[in-house]
Image (cartoon, coloured by chain):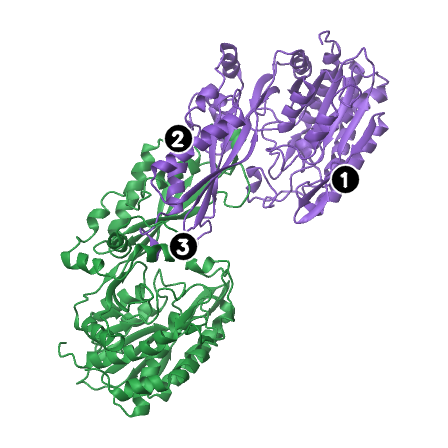
Chain colours: A green, B purple
Amino acid sequence: MAAPAQFTEYIDKNADKFIDRLAKAVAIPSVSGDASYRKHVFEMADFLKSELEALGVKVKLVPLGKQVLDGQEIDLPPAILGEIGNDKSKKTVGLYAHYDVQPPSSHSKLIDKPQALLSDGWDTDPFVLKVDEKTGRLIGRGSSDDKGPLLGWINVLEAHVKQGIELPVNLKFCLEGKFHRMEESGSEGLDDLINSEVGPGKFFDGVDCVCISDNYWLNTRTPCLTYGLRGICYYKINVSGPAKDLHSGVFGRMVHEPMTDLIHIMSKLVTPQGDILVPGINELVAPLTEEERKRYESLDYSIDDVHSSAGAEIAVSSSISEVLMNRMRYPSLSLHGIEGAFYAAGAKTVIPARVAGKFSIRLVPDMLPVDVDRLVTEYIKSIFNQLNSKNKLEVESLHGGKPWVADPNHWNYVAAAKATETVYGRKPDLTREGGSIPVTLTFAEALGVNVLLLPMGRGDDGAHSTNEKLDRSNYIEGTKLLGTYLWEVSKVTEK
Amino acid sequence: MAAPAQFTEYIDKNADKFIDRLAKAVAIPSVSGDASYRKHVFEMADFLKSELEALGVKVKLVPLGKQVLDGQEIDLPPAILGEIGNDKSKKTVGLYAHYDVQPPSSHSKLIDKPQALLSDGWDTDPFVLKVDEKTGRLIGRGSSDDKGPLLGWINVLEAHVKQGIELPVNLKFCLEGKFHRMEESGSEGLDDLINSEVGPGKFFDGVDCVCISDNYWLNTRTPCLTYGLRGICYYKINVSGPAKDLHSGVFGRMVHEPMTDLIHIMSKLVTPQGDILVPGINELVAPLTEEERKRYESLDYSIDDVHSSAGAEIAVSSSISEVLMNRMRYPSLSLHGIEGAFYAAGAKTVIPARVAGKFSIRLVPDMLPVDVDRLVTEYIKSIFNQLNSKNKLEVESLHGGKPWVADPNHWNYVAAAKATETVYGRKPDLTREGGSIPVTLTFAEALGVNVLLLPMGRGDDGAHSTNEKLDRSNYIEGTKLLGTYLWEVSKVTEK
């Protein structure tokens, strides 16, 4: 069942009003990773509460406790729990989005995503939404990540209220104010809240499926549904030797040097082609099915797309399905750097006394952090023993998160696919993401329901970079998509 | 011919006066690596000029031009050229020392020697000489490196002048004010000056031998003469791939990662036992002679000494002569660090876009930087080619300096050995240093005479660290040693 015509007409007619709403939201610099911005994160929560309440949503702001940031103890931004509709005959859809943003500066100490390490600045004020009529871009921090998608749901509500259309489903909003910084390693406070709100009479009681709009199309052309995320295990290999840094003139070749040992270990983790050398890791990976293989072969993505997004012709293979499977359904191992060694410009002749190599493995089903930890630790110890060094080794696991994958044949996905066909006139690609959004797994495990990632923006939105944008057409058609998805869910008869 | 008895008596009687002179010198914070201290370096030059002139030395301060330091263009400290005596029937001894010091702080950005990276602070004010009566230590920045040895020469002059003893040799002082920071890579300005002052009628005309007092005993017990220094070649391996840093979730296993390539290359340079893996390098090393082997076997040094100076039981061998030869007469290769990778604490999931591995090779005879450069560059390129990576490689040589070795059977060394036996009652060890003092090679090559390194301090003086000290006995007996050495030189009949 497509959404009623009045719904889509209202969206088209009120596009400029919706863009104004986005401008208002972008103007609130709800940067979660900097203590000095914290008041604006609360301001954003208040803004959303009033927008939601004006449309009939019952809202409560739930405090999540304190955190230490920039050397001070401050309040965590609240979770926003909102509900509208309580009709047992309707499906109930859980909705998640986050209302905080990345720091605007490309050099902020708080940036987790390396795209934001670019030295280029913004072309416009990041907290003033720039509507570029020529390109159709809506430029501003948070436009695509994640204020645009979040406001999409509010726009959907408004269209129904203003047109007097009854909502086809019950909705439960769970909006987070401290997603950034936490995205790779779990949501501080929110996981506990979600787990505590599960069960008869609790907030999430009765939720039939969850929809999260917080990722992007694979490319700039084709809508997609995302049914998997990789997990991550992050490791630190500590090698220590002398009591203090030594001079390589005096001590070179007299003593075992920690850097030499560490580099030897790190060189045995992954090949230049990306193959993981830790024994047993590849055996944990779920075998590829024929259905899956076909799905990857049909995705709208090319080696040129890889090269254009990396900015260099460095794809590990000329087969695009292989490259995409490497990102989406195989584990990867990346060497990030070394703590304790000489890292500045120039030519220091130090023998560092203790060095720590950092690397992470992206996990896919059926890899569990506990198994990966064991295999990695045993392997590194065995390599180190073969080095016959008198230095000391310690392997640390800094954090671990499981991969997530959903059944893309579930009615939740079928509904989203139909909605996409209705709005965009084409079938969506079925994708998995290489990164992690741990709250997805929390919803899936705590609620025991199907979770869908339904992106609004495009692959080139630059969500954590400068000049973040959301295309006007993605915002407006994406709003239609969200509403239409609710109508498609409403006609599902399965539980 | 030992020095006259009045000489040594004067030294003993005036020990406290000499310690006062050292206190005055230490009180001038002549830190050369920090622009804000530069005026004190000039102050130190003036202090030395007046001390030398008061004892009859003809002194000129030679400007060496400008340098850029801490973002400002400032004057380089002057070279001090001083001469006393012009008796053609006597030998002429060239003397080198430096009058600048390392920064006192353990965290200064300017520190080249890694010992100074220690986080421990000083127990006393580094610029107030602390005379510790219990331990006999004279504690202060520059006490051992190099103000104590420099003032030793002035004490020797004073003893002669005050006792009415004619100097047995002519002396030519060449004192440098910007040794630190430059010590591994050459002396800015001074090399040119030395080269320009060679030849008939020039300052260094007639110099028969050079004595440099700017290193240390191998241990805390046995005086030594030092007849060799290793050279150094410093390299930077640049690997670049994507146009910007990438997110390992999104790009992990899709693209060739520069860090993976670099780590593979760096792992193929040296074994954990210190053996250099660059083909052809070991073949450049002069073969070990039987005389040399015996010299190393007779040195007063033990594996316990190695462990105690490194602060950990990490010697690469249980054979002390092997370990000492590794330091003194074999090349070494140390991996210093990586520029461009993640180096901070924490767990960033970056794929760095461009990384640069830093390493250096210590050179011994007959290794020449030009040959080492060629072998290293060819080898790294061949390893990289085998990696089948699409990233880009560039190998840079940051600087190169030749090794230096003198003939320890030369009369200059014989004189110093006799002086040592006279003052300390024992034969000195004949050592080579693992580090570099490039000015040594400049003197040897420009003047074409034998150069001797005659250390005053002990191996535990902590010359570039906190709580730098010179033992009172090393300062006073060392002053006698310098004077006695001049008298021994004076009786040499060979040219």
x, y percent for residue B252? 33, 52
Along the viewing direction, whichever of B28 and B159 lies nearer the viewer: B28
Q: Quadrant of residue A404?
A: bottom left
Along the viewing direction, whichever of A243 and A223 lies nearer the viewer: A223
**Residue farthest along the top direction in this orientation:** B493
Disc 1 residue type (three-letter)? Phe
x, y percent for residue A481? 28, 77
Q: Chain of mark 1?
A: B
Asked if residue A117 can be seen in this view, the reply is yes
Residue ID for mark 3: A311
Asked if residue A392 can be seen in this view, the reply is no
Q: Quadrant of the C terminus of chain B?
A: top right
How far apart are the alpha carbons under marks 2 and 1? 46 Å
Disc 2 residue type (three-letter)? Thr
Judge left or right: residue B366 versus residue B143: left
Q: Mark 3–mark 1 contact, CB under 8 Å?
A: no
x, y percent for residue B209? 70, 17
Residue ID for mark 1: B42
Q: Residue at x 48, y 73 (%)?
A: A29
Judge left or right: residue A73 versus residue B57: left
Residue ID for mark 2: B271
- Total marks shown come to 3
User: Within 10 Å of the Cα at label 1, are there few (<14), some (14-19), or many (20+) other Cα atoms?
Assistant: many
Q: Are marks 3 and 2 on the same chain?
A: no
Along the viewing direction, whichever of A185 and A65 lies nearer the viewer: A185
x, y percent for residue A326? 27, 53
Q: Chain of mark 2?
A: B
Residue B138 circle label: none
Residue A269 lies, with reference to residue B189, above or below; the image says: below
